[in-house]
Amino acid sequence: MKIRTLSLAIATGLAALSASAQDASIDKTRTSLQEWVETRQIIAKEKADWTLLKQTLIDTKELLSTQQTQLEEKLKELEESKTAADDEREKLMAENAELKAATDVLKAKVSEIEVNLLAIIPSFPETLQDAIDPLMRRIPKPGSESKASLGERVQNIVGILSQAEKFNGKISLVNRTQALPDGREVQVSTLYWGLGQAYFVDTTGTYAGVGFPTSEGWVYEEVAGFAPDVNKLISIYEGEATDVTFIPVPASIK
């Protein structure tokens, strides 16, 4: 009778411990899912802001380019025709002055955007920085004059934002070299969640962790025991996994 009572007590204790562990796992999963949803919302807002800015620049460039072409054609015709009325000439000159004033405003705005781009480029993943490097080289340093036309500068900005928007709207798998704390370098596979988060694992499946952007560049931190989860994420991404399951991963909202 004592043995049966003791066995019943042990079984009851184990069941309570199991239920407690399950509750803790559910809470951890719920927290990770909430953080992931918040991260996606932030990324979606940034994507919408960039899309609006890009379209505004394109529309403004097209409008000013069309107006300037039309005005230059009219002025040329007026110069060739000595019989044109003086008031028409004055009107066109006034319109040209207005256009130049509008162009000056746009130049100031383009310069401001270029400065902002130079400031946020370090927060882009290295692979994206390499892709847009030819475009970034065309941006003048703060305080210096650009030799490019206004239209070329607008087109350059749109090109950078388009590539950043494209990268931010998808998951990208990149093979890269990463320095360890002891100075050694290892090859890692890095899965970027747009511009906001990354997960990496080395070829041996022993060194893994998370990456996130800062104003001075991306920071990659090791997470102990995280390698199997990252390998599973990569397997699902590449279509090699036979089953797709929910994998809790750490996320950081900056």
Image (cartoon, helix red, strand yellow):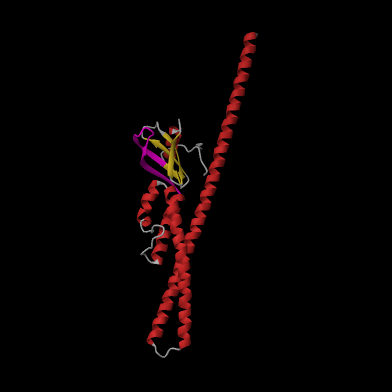
Q: Residue furthest front?
A: 143
Q: Looking at the image, which is closer to me, 237 or 56?
A: 56
Looking at the magenta stretch, what is its main secondary structure? strand
Q: Is residue 98 visible?
A: yes
Residue 180 belongs to magenta span: yes
Q: Which residues are magenta?
A: 170-190
Q: Quadrant of residue 18?
A: top right
Q: Is residue 237 visible?
A: no
41 relative to 210 in the view: left or right:
right
Tell me residue 96's x, y (percent).
45, 77
Q: Quadrant of the N terminus?
A: top right
Name above or below for residue 75 compared with residue 172: below
Q: Looking at the image, which is closer to me, 90 or 75?
A: 90
Q: Residue furthest bottom?
A: 83
Question: Residue drawn 58% across and 27% down?
Answer: 21
Tell me residue 49's x, y (percent).
51, 56
Tell me residue 114's x, y (percent).
43, 58
Name above or below for residue 214 compared with residue 80: above
Residue 172 belongs to magenta span: yes
3 relative to 82 in the view: left or right:
right
Question: Residue drawn 44% across and 65% down?
Answer: 107
Name above or below for residue 113 compared with residue 171: below
